[in-house]
């Protein structure tokens, strides 16, 4: 089961890369939600891997990796000629990673407290 969950997480990461670099990504038809899409995509990505790897070192490594991915993809978008570089997208990606990590930490702590009978 764990292998399937990890494979799904990596497939999701690959989808983010593809969506970031394809010349014509699918549109939801809702205007002005680009930054929210970035934030949510990276929050879910970080949350997924933070729950799979609950150790602090692993979470820090994945967080740094996902932030680096978000930065690298912005530069790659500029290089495609069909997409544009945006510092605000980098910020939304980074904030998403931080939110995903915080949510995973909070859930892990709450589960631990529930298991010990303390809160």
Image (cartoon, rainbow, N blue to C red):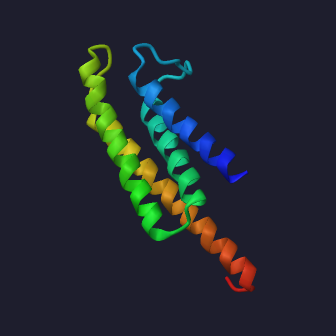
Residue shown at 49% from the left, 59% from the top: 101
Nearest the eye: 1 or 71: 1
Q: Indicate whether 57 appears above or below 26.
A: below
Nearest the eye: 40 or 47: 47
Nearest the eye: 106 or 8: 8
Q: Position of residue 71 (x, y in %)?
A: 30, 40
- Return the residue found at the far front: 3
Q: Indicate whether 80 appears above or below 69.
A: above
Residue shown at 50% from the left, 62% from the top: 102
Residue shown at 40% from the left, 47% from the top: 66
Residue shown at 47% from the left, 25% from the top: 19
Left or right placement of residue 108 versus residue 78 in this view: right
Left or right placement of residue 55 versus residue 93 in this view: right
Count of marks placed on residues: 0
Quadrant holding the C terminus:
bottom right
Which quadrant holds residue 90?
A: top left
Q: Position of residue 80 (x, y in %)?
A: 29, 18
Q: Position of residue 10 (x, y in %)?
A: 54, 41
Q: Indicate whether 42 appears above or below 33.
A: below
């Amino acid at each position: 089961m764990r292998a399937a969950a990890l494979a799904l997480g990596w497939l999701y990461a690959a989808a983010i890369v593809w969506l970031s670099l394809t010349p014509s990504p699918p549109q939801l038809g809702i205007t002005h939600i680009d930054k929210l899409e970035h934030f949510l995509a990276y929050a879910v990505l970080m949350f997924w891997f933070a729950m799979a790897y609950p150790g602090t070192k692993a979470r820090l490594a994945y967080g740094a990796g996902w932030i680096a991915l978000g930065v690298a993809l912005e530069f790659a978008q500029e290089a495609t000629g069909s997409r544009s570089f945006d510092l605000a997208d980098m910020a939304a990606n980074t904030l998403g990673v931080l939110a995903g990590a915080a949510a995973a930490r909070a859930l892990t702590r709450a589960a631990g407290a529930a298991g010990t009978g303390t809160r």
